[in-house]
Amino acid sequence: MNGRTASPVVPRLVPRLLPRLLNVRQRMRAAAVDALVVSHLPNIRYLTGFVGTAGLVVLTPTACSLIVDFRYQTVARALLSANPEAAAHFNVVVPAQSYDETLADVLRECGARRIGIEAAHMPVSRFNRLAA
């Protein structure tokens, strides 16, 4: 062992994430969307630093909600709690129901009317359920 712990990775990660969020939010404004649903895992990692096999992100002009199931809640919360700056920009949501029901709840709570999606990565069936 080299004596280093995993926590120093987070402070180096957060400064890279904030410009990414700003860039995506600028694109959201240009596209006139209130929220963006990110479902493609590489894009979730790009925006949040979260590495897992399941999750969703809801990005709004003021918040970034990382939706992860119970298997990943400890890892996701540790990612944020290791750096207070991250906690100011991200929050973790653990679904009490399905991902889609939780996603719909998060979108309702933020009051989003126009919602952007990753069309290349969201199945039409999921889109239709959410649109309903």
Image (tube, helix red, strand yellow):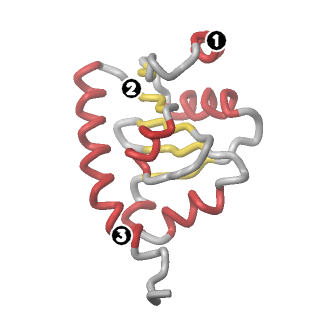
* Front label number (3 vs 2): 3
Per the rendering, the mark at residue 125 is 1
Give whichever of 31, 105 is nearer the camera: 31
In the picture provided, is 50 more to the left or to the right than 61? right
Decide which of tag 3 and tag 2 comes sooner along the chain: 3
Where residue 65 appears, x then y in whole percent? 50, 44
Residue at (38, 45) in percent of width and height? 46
**Callout 3–callout 1 Cβ contact below 8 Å:** no
Residue at (67, 47) in percent of width and height? 94
In the picture provided, is 41 more to the left or to the right than 94? left
Where 12 sits versus 126, above or below?
below
What's the amino acid at mark 1? Ser
Q: How many labels sit on residues?
A: 3
Compute the Cα span from label 3 to label 1.
38 Å
Q: Where is mark 3, residue-wise?
A: 11
Mark 2 nearby-residue class (10 Å; few <14, some 14–19, many ≥20): some
Where residue 25 appears, x then y in whole percent? 29, 35
Mark 3 nearby-residue class (10 Å; few <14, some 14–19, many ≥20): some
What's the amino acid at mark 2? Asp
What's the amino acid at mark 3? Pro
Q: Where is mark 2, residue-wise?
A: 34
Where 111 sits versus 75, above or below?
above
**Callout 1–callout 2 Cβ contact below 8 Å:** no
Compute the Cα span from label 3 to label 2.
29 Å
Give whichever of 79, 95 is nearer the camera: 79
